Image (tube, rainbow, N blue to C red):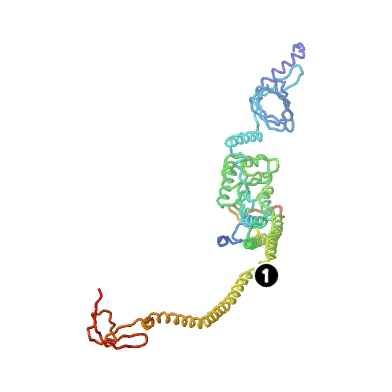
Amino acid sequence: MVEERALTVVEAMTLARRALESVTVRVVGEVSEFNDKPGYKAAYFTVCDENASMPCMMWRDAYLASGVDLRCGVLVELSGSFSAYVPKGRMQFMVKRLALAGEGMLRMQVADLARKLESEGLMRAERKRALPAYPARIAVVTSPRGKAVHDVIRTLRRRYPLAELLVAGVAVEGTDAPRAIVEGLEAAAGASPDVILLVRGGGSYEDLMPFNHELVARAVASSPVPVVTGIGHEPDTSIADMVADLRASTPTAAAEAVAPSIEELRQRLVSITRLLGRALSHTVQSYEHRLRLVARRPVLCDPAVLTGPAWQRIDMVALDLARAIPLRLSRDAQRLAYLRERLVRVGPRVHERAAERVAREGGRLMDLSPNAILGRGYALCLAEDGRVVVRSPDQVRTGEPVQVRVAGGRIGCIVETTDTEA
Amino acid sequence: MVEDTMALPDDLAFGEALAELEAIVAALEGGQLELEESLTRYERGVALLQSLQSKLTDAQQRVTMLIGELGEDEAAE
C-alpha cells in the first residue's frame, strides 16, 4: 500500500466539494433561519426538520425568480446539490429551484386565487351589502356537528330569539366539502332569509381549505342574500371571508354581527316609551297653552262680547222702532189737530171773505143792474108785452102802445111818431 | 284616510314596526302635528310599542334544518 502524500487543506476541501456537488436531490423542509440582505449576492437560509438542519444558499436572481417569499416556518421544497464553501470548510446546499410545499404551497395557491378574484372586483368594498338591522330569518351554512353550529344557535337564542334560524348542515371538510358548501349556500338562499351565516370552527390551514375554494368563493360572492362569514379563529382569513359581505372572526362573532341584542332592544323600547309619552304630553301641553292663551281672549271669556254688539244693534233698532211709531203717530195727530185748528180758524174767515166778496160782487151786480142805470135818469122802452126791449124805431108802429120803464116805475105810452136816425 | 291602509302592528316585521315607531316619536317630537294627528300617531305608536314588546317577551327561538340533522351540542354537556 503506497502511502499517498498528505493533502493540503484546500485540496481536501476541494475534493469534498466535488464529491458533494455530484449529488443532486430534492429536499422538503421548514425554513428556520432566513437571511436576505440586499447587498448579498445570495439568499442564505436554513431548512430543518425534527432531527436535522441544513444550511442553504440560493443565488439572489434565482431566488427572486422563484416568486417565493421565504419566511421562517414556511415549508419549502428545494432542489439542487450539496456543496462546500472551501475557505470556511462549511457544507451547504446550493438551491437551484425553490417552491412552497404542503401548506406553503396551499397558501400560494390561495394567494393566486385571491389575486384573481380581487382583479375581478369581487372583494371591492362597494360590493359589500349592508346587513338588515332586524333579520327575521337567519340561515346558517355549517357543519351540523361540532361546536360552531351550536355557538351560533346559542348566541342567537340569547341575543335575538325573534329570528327564525334555518340551518343547512353540510360537510365542511374533505374533498366534497366545497360542493357541499355551495349546495348549502344555495339551499339557504332558496329559503329567502335576510342574511346567511357561513361558519366553521377552528382547524388547521388545510382544514379550512374548502373555504378557499374557488367554487365556494364564487357562490358567496354571487349570493342573492348578504353573507357573513365566521371561519376558524381570529387570524385565519379565507377567500370566502374576503368576498363575503361581512367577515367575522369566529362563528360566535358572526352570530353577534347579524343580530341586535334583545336586551338593547328592550332598553330601546323602554326609552321609546318614555319619549313617546313625553312627546305627546309636550304636544298636548303646547296645544293647551295655546288654548289657554286663546281662551283668555275676551271673545271666549264672555260670550256676550260676541253676541253683544248684535244684540245691542237689535236693541237700538227696537228702540228706534218703538220710538218711531208713536212719534210718527203723535206727529200725525198733532198735525191733524193743527190742521183742524187751522180749518176751524179758517172756516169763519172763509165765510167772512165769501160774504165780503158776495157783498162786493153784489155791489158790482147792482151797478150792472138796469135799475141802477135807470136811477141815473135813463129810461127803458119795452114792447107792449113788457118783455122785448125796443132798440130801434123800426120795432114799433105809430099808435102802438109801449111801456117805458124809469127808475120810479112804468109809464104806459103810445107811439106818435117814429123817426129813424141815420 | 291613511289609517285605513296601515298594517296591523303584529303583521309588520320587527324592524319595520320599530322604524315606524321611531318615525312617530320623531314626528311627535317635531311638534308640527295637529292635535288630532298627534293623538292618532300616539295611539299608533302605543300599538306598535305593545306589539314590539310582546314580540320581545314571547320570542322563542325556532330552528329549522334545511339540510342534514343537528348533532349534539358538545358544549352543553
Question: In the picture, residue A122 is in which quadrant?
Answer: top right
Question: Which quadrant is the C terminus of chain A positioned in?
Answer: bottom left
Q: Is residue A290 above or below residue A101?
A: below
Q: Residue A398's x, y, as percent?
A: 22, 84
The residue closer to the viewer here, A333 or A386, is: A386
Picture residue at 72% right of the left edge, 26% below the top: A45
In the current view of this chain or complex, which residue is farthest to the front?
A: A416
Q: Residue A255's x, y, as percent?
A: 67, 50
Question: In the picture, residue A34 is in which quadrant?
Answer: top right
For mark 1, does the 10 Å Cα neighbourhood hold few (<14), some (14 to 19), or many (20 or more) residues? few
The answer, for residue A162, to whether it is visible in the render is no
Q: Residue B14's x, y, as percent?
A: 63, 57
Q: Secondary structure at mark 1?
A: loop
| Circle count | 1
The residue closer to the viewer here, A413 or A5, is: A413
Q: From the viewer's perspective, tell me whether residue A329 is left or right of residue A20.
A: left
Picture residue at 74% right of the left edge, 28% below the top: A33
Q: Residue A59's x, y, as percent?
A: 68, 21
Question: Which quadrant is the N terminus of chain A positioned in?
Answer: top right
Q: Which residue is mark 1?
A: A302
Q: Is residue A28 above or below residue A128?
A: above
Q: Is residue A393 above or below residue B71?
A: below
The answer, for residue A8, to whether it is visible in the render is yes
Write down the chain letter for disc 1: A
Tag 1: amino acid:
Asp
Question: In the picture, residue A361 is in which quadrant?
Answer: bottom left
